[in-house]
Image (cartoon, helix red, strand yellow):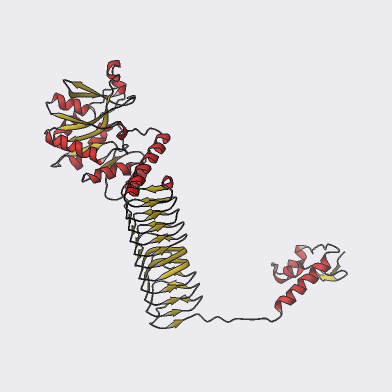
Amino acid sequence: MIQWTLSALREVGAEPIVVVVGAHAEALKAACGPGIQFVHQAEQRGTGHAALMARPAFENLPGDALVLSADLPMLKAESLRRLVDRHRATNAGVSLMTATVAEPHGWGRIVRRGGAVHAIVEERDATAEERALPEVNVGVYCLVPRRLFPILDRVTADNAQGEIYLTDMVGGAVQAGIHVADVSVEADEVVQVNSRIDLAAIGKTLREGTNRMWMEAGVTFEDPERAYIGPDVTIGRDTVIGPNVHLRGHTVVGQNCRFDGSAYVTDATIADGVHVKFGVVITGSEVGRACQIGPFAQLRPGTRLAPEVHIGDFVETKNAILGERTKANHLTYLGDTEIGTDTNIGAGTITCNYDGFRKYRTIIGSRVQVGSDSQLVAPVTIADDAYIGTGTTVREDVHAGALVFNPKQDVQRPGWVAARRAREAGAATDAEPQPTQLPRPQAIAKGKGRTGGAARRAKVPPKKGAASSAKGTGKRKRTR
């Protein structure tokens, strides 16, 4: 949810962006993504206290600062611009955003005198008359830090919740003779999120608006209700988005691309004409023009694909650079790898990049043919035009144009299958008429402390009337 608020701030050019975190800080930091400064509020003592925690980042700021709650995903960048413009046009010390809502329960009320904002009263501290007021505080402010932080220093926690209210800063500014300005926004921009039900409803509304915007810009959605496009994503014209596609973070998608469905793409750059097939995950990667990815492939951070590269089913790349027209179509892991142009990576190839202590790189040249089921043990370099035989483990560098293979001898035993089948059929026939009790384990294992060949022999039931030997006992036993 916070991504929508951050996107609006970026759109108006706010810099730096500082997020005050408390509970679940690490999860919130991960959700915010890169380019954000964080301040930790170890003890949650109210919104005013949170603003004071960010004081070092803003106190000496020469311009104005926007201070707002993070749970306003419907707030538009245009409304923030309007607030800033009003603030500067009136030379105000603090400006705030208000809205008139049908059901103001839970909101702080705007108290006016002579038409000007006089104070903000939280609902728990409001009188019955103040609670009847329909105009509420949205929780968005534009202020001059050097003038307002001294006022915030004097705010106390003498209220029903025992917290330092940021809203009390407004009343303090009025008392100090500092001009307070305000702008109003539509109620649908300030919908509160107080439950998971609210969150789901807001998420659906945001998705509908985002998908409609991209469809108007020339993007096709096969099922708009099942496409999830983040606020900082951009998509080129004539791209087709299938069902259950998630585009997250700062992903950039070119023109004439196709996503078949169930793809999850985060912070990726995808050039024109790329085909992303079913079940693909792409994170922190660059995909060149006319590449084909998937199905069921994963591009991990650091992957860079040149134009017309093919990454097929069950292929995983990590920190890998692949040259033009190179293909890895099946069941392959390419980690910490650099590959030239027009190289073919056979099914089941693994770059063995980790020895349990460090990661190493594999360098593969152009026009190299890597046979199926090969292991390339890094660090290793395979020069241009080399040929790696099927099932080869490569441990040493390979020269240009060389053939590399591991010798393996094929051993054939003619007639072995027929003999085995006859033997098994005969054993089954002999065993069926009368079950045989196996010899006692101690008779088989006695003397050596192991069950090796004697134990294996004992598993085949002896024929009727035959004698079996109990090794080391000097006795003979007849089966019943």
What is the x, y in percent for residue 124?
A: 31, 22
- Residue 91 in the image, given as x and y percentages of width and height: 11, 34
- The quarter holding residue 309 reads bottom left
8 sits to left or right of 361? left
Q: Is residue 432 above or below residue 16?
A: below
Position of 394 relative to 70 (above/below): below
Q: Where is residue 18 in the image (x, y as percent from the top left)?
A: 25, 43
Which residue shows up at 20% across the image and 37% down it? 82
Q: Is residue 252 left or right of residue 292?
A: left
x and y percent of residue 150 in the render? 16, 32
Nearer to me, 334 or 153:
334
The answer to whether residue 441 shows anywhere in this view is: yes
Whether 291 is drawn above or below 147: the answer is below
Q: Nearer the viewer, residue 304 or 391?
A: 304
Side (left or right) of 199 relative to 76: right
Quarter of the image that includes the C terminus: bottom right
Q: Residue at x 50, y 73 (%)?
A: 372
Residue furthest to the bottom in view is: 402
Q: Is residue 144 something that shows in the picture?
A: no
Please identify the quadrant where the N terminus is shown: top left
Relative to residue 102, is residue 37 depicted above or below? below
All told, the count of numbered labels is: 0
The part of the image, by quadrant, that contains residue 423 is bottom right
Observer-nearest of 60 and 36: 36
Asked whether 324 or 41 is in front, the reply is 324
